[in-house]
Amino acid sequence: MDGKKYVSSKLLELLSPSYSERTTNNPFKNLSLKEMEIAKHLDEGKSLPEISNILKIQYSTANTYKRRIFEKLNVHSVLLLSRLMKSFEV
């Protein structure tokens, strides 16, 4: 292939298990686009009132999204959310 080295996806998985674990077991893939957007704002240290103002949604809606994010990712604080985001390089 143009004189370049080629590694199959199966071989890549065998050589790099941490890479395949991050991509296949990434819990952030279960979040909707809106949930991901809110998770990023929370990670940046924004409060729910700030997020609801930025996204032009009700505070209660932002709070519901936050609760769903925490449930889906099995975290109970923004600090744990931030650590999880960093570990998956989100």
Image (cartoon, rainbow, N blue to C red):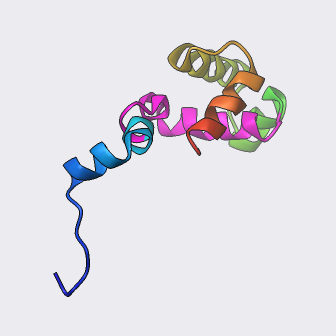
Q: How many marks?
A: 0
Q: What stretch is highlighted in magenta?
A: 23-46
- The verdict on residue 45 being magenta is yes
User: Residue 40 is drawn in which quadrant?
Assistant: top right
Judged left or right of residue 34, residue 51 is right
Give the position of the N terminus as an image quadrant: bottom left
Task: State the residue at coordinates (23%, 51%).
Answer: 11
Q: Please tell me whether residue 20 is drawn above or below residue 67 in the rendered image.
A: below
The image quarter containing residue 74 is: top right
Q: Say which of 57 and 5 sits in front.
A: 5
Please say if 48 is above or below 13.
above
Secondary structure mostly seen in magenta is helix
Residue shown at the point (74%, 33%) measured from the top left:
42
Residue 70 placed where, x, y %?
61, 17
On the image, the x and y values in percent for residue 56 come to: 70, 39
Q: Position of residue 34 (x, y in %)?
A: 55, 37
Residue in the image at 51% along x and 18% along y: 72
